[in-house]
């Protein structure tokens, strides 16, 4: 078995299968709620990003003790076109 193996074959009782299906349904419902909340928060999050960029471009950030470093506006990251923040359910690479 490798670290990429997600399950070990075994037999489950009908009761366990039913419980597992219910549990998965509850998890998916919770996940959908979290995604909705994250999508609703998107405009506020964009504002937070902009405030952070403004702060590090004007007053900088501490690098060591009282030493501060200001980041030039042209060095700030730019969000790729069409990309949005998202909630990730499963980590790793698809298909693995």
Image (tube, helix red, strand yellow):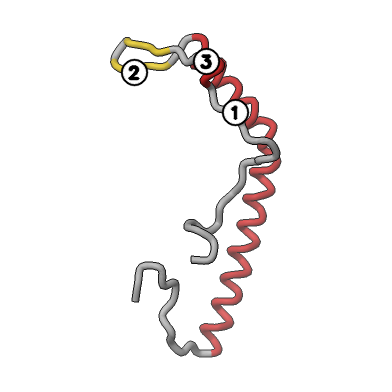
Vertical side of 61 occupied by 44: above or below? below
The residue under label 1 is 78
Q: Is residue 68 above or below residue 50?
A: above
Which badge, 2 or 1, is on the more N-terminal residue?
2
Q: Quadrant of residue 1?
A: bottom left
Instruction: Tell me the residue that label 3 is attached to.
Output: 55
In-front residue for pair 48/83: 83
Q: Secondary structure at mark 1?
A: loop
On the picture, is 17 further left or further right than 47? Answer: left
Q: Residues within 10 Å of mark 3 (few under 14, many from 20)?
A: some
Residue with the mark numbered 2 = 63
- Marks 2 and 1 sit apart, C-alpha to C-alpha, by 22 Å
In the image, what residue occupies the spot 44% across and 76% down? 7
**Viewer-side label of 2, 1:** 1
Rendered view: 50 above or below 38: above
Disc 3 element = helix
Circle 1 Cα neighbour tier, 10 Å, few/some/many (<14 / 14–19 / ≥20)? few
Residue at 53% from the left image edge and 22% from the top image edge: 76
């Amino acid at each position: 078995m490798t670290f990429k193996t997600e399950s070990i074959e075994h037999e489950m009782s009908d009761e366990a299968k039913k419980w597992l299906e219910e549990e998965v349904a509850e998890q998916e419902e919770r996940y959908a709620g979290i995604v909705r909340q994250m999508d609703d928060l998107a405009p506020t999050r964009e504002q937070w990003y902009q405030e952070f960029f403004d702060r590090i471009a004007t007053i900088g950030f501490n690098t060591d003790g009282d030493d501060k470093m200001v980041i030039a506006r042209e060095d700030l990251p730019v969000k790729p076109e069409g990309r949005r923040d998202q909630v990730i359910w499963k980590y790793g690479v698809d298909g693995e």
